[in-house]
Image: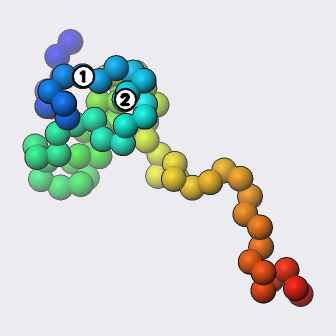
Amino acid sequence: MDFKYRWKNGSPPSRDQAAKSEHLLDESQFENEQDRSLAEDMARKHLNVPLSTADQDLSILPQAAPPEQRQK
């Protein structure tokens, strides 16, 4: 099966590289960020790697209360 977008480095990345990389596709082929985001999700599905999520940059560990709130 052929993929209709250009890959970032000219060829499809391995599954390990795709899972670690934020962007898989060449950004010059997109007019806006929404189109790029949709194409990136399609590329990840094509490679069978996990999709990016909106909260992936947030810590999963609970955060301590700021010092001014701990004193109360």
Q: Which mark is residue 18?
A: 2
C-alpha separation, residue under disc 1 versus residue under disc 2: 9 Å
Say what amino acid the circle numbered 2 marks. Answer: Ala
For the point 17% across and 16% down, the residue is 2
For this view, does 33 lie left or right of residue 14? left
Badge 1 is on which residue? 12
Q: Mark 2 and mark 1 in contact (Cβ < 8 Å)? A: yes
Query: x and y percent of residue 52 in the render?
Result: 43, 41
- 16 or 34: nearer the eye? 16
Say what amino acid the circle numbered 1 marks. Answer: Pro
Q: Quadrant of the C terminus?
A: bottom right
Report the number of numbered marks.
2
Query: x and y percent of residue 57 in the render?
Result: 51, 53
Q: Earlier in the sequence, mark 1 or mark 2?
A: 1
Q: Quadrant of residue 20?
A: top left
Task: Name the residue furthest right.
Answer: 72
Query: x and y percent of residue 41 in the render?
Result: 33, 37
For this view, does 16 lie left or right of residue 56? left
Can you say whether 69 is above or below 26 in the image? below
For the point 17% across and 39% down, the residue is 26
Can you say whether 47 is above or below 55 in the image? above
For the point 34% across and 20% down, the residue is 14
The image's colouring method is rainbow
Dot 1 lies on which element? loop
